[in-house]
Amino acid sequence: MKKEISAIHPELQKVAQTVPKVTYSKWNIWLFNILLGMTPAPRPPETILVKNMFIQSGSSRVRVRVYHPKSVDAPTPALLWMHGGGYVMGKPEQDDFVCLQYVQELGITVVSVDYRHAPKQPFPAGLEDCYTALKWMAFESGDLRIDKDRIAIGGGSAGGGLAAALAQLAHDRQEVKPAFQLLIYPMLDDRTVLRTDLDDSNNVAWDKKSNRFGWESYLGGECGAANAPDHAVPARRADLSNLPPAWLGVGMLDLFYEEGMAYAKRLHEAGVPCEVTAVPGAFHGFDVFDPSIPLVLEFRRSQMDAMKKYLFA
């Protein structure tokens, strides 16, 4: 039986009608990466310095995009941000608006990682790039003017999945201890691909076929294998104890809704504080199309409140 889901929220219906229905695959992903690469970055406000820097991740040179409040000289809390794109596309500039908003409202520094994508660079390439950026932030905290003890990690969609995996990897390597994880409709579980009971009718921005393509590209093989590589699929980890406190937000029409709720429940059961924001009638990526919608403003406010709680306590 297909899952019973509510209709798209009235505030989001106009947006949903304007979003073209696209299924991502190996045949068209190159085009979307080109289009994303051509999208100009918005002009930052005069109060924020935005600069691109490069760090070494193994044999690869990785770009990080740094957003820093000009008026702050003392070390600030920081957020390491991972963009979305199903593990197969995207760039930091696509999230300039939200990163600038975090800086403006919270007075923090944000570092966004231009990590490597599958299928050309499958797991663990992208995750290792993000871990390299996390270590760089901690070890170069003086020059970056950030507080190494108050570094959060976060992202949306696949970026949220990378943030969850990064929290696990950092815990296991014991080199850097993130203070908080911000998981925005995170892509956490490859086994969702195998489910036949999920209704796909209201998946405006990311459907089941795209989800299969993203996971198979990232894992370099079929989904649902008995033994997934460590840190590749956050939901597969048996022990979630001693991870950083979390905020997890997801729309109730999102393909990732149930896997997100299950992960939040497991974090709570493992003794990890996890605040949950479930948005009725919201589809995947609902917040990126029109930031003025009241539902989106409320969703963003919940994130800001959680970061204030864990980064400024």
Image (cartoon, grey):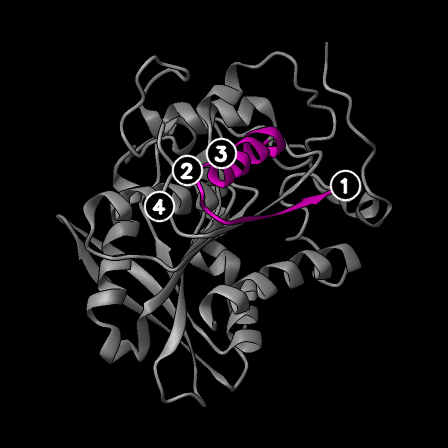
| Percent of width and height locating residue 47 | 51, 86
Identity of the residue drawn at 43% across and 87% down: 70
Q: Residue 2's image quarter?
A: top right
Crowding at dot 1, Cα within 10 Å, few <14 / some 14-19 / many 20+, comes out as: some
Residue identifier under label 4: 242
Question: What is the secondary structure assignment of the residue under circle 2?
Answer: loop
Asked whether the viewer can see residue 137, the reply is: yes
Nearer the observer: mark 3 or 1; the answer is 3
Specify the segment rendered in magenta. 256-281
Asked if 147 appears above or below 190 in the picture, the reply is below
Q: Position of residue 45 (x, y in %)?
A: 55, 81
The residue that label 3 is drawn on is: 266
Q: Earlier in the sequence, mark 2 or mark 4?
A: 2
Image quarter for residue 139?
A: bottom left
Q: CA distance from mark 3 to mark 4?
A: 12 Å
The label shown at residue 280 is 1
Query: Residue 164 versus residue 98: which sits nearer the camera?
Result: 164
Identified by mark 1, the residue type is: Pro
Residue where numbered disc 2 is placed: 87
C-alpha span from label 1 to label 2: 26 Å
Q: Is residue 222 above or below residue 138?
A: above
Three-letter code, disc 2 = Tyr
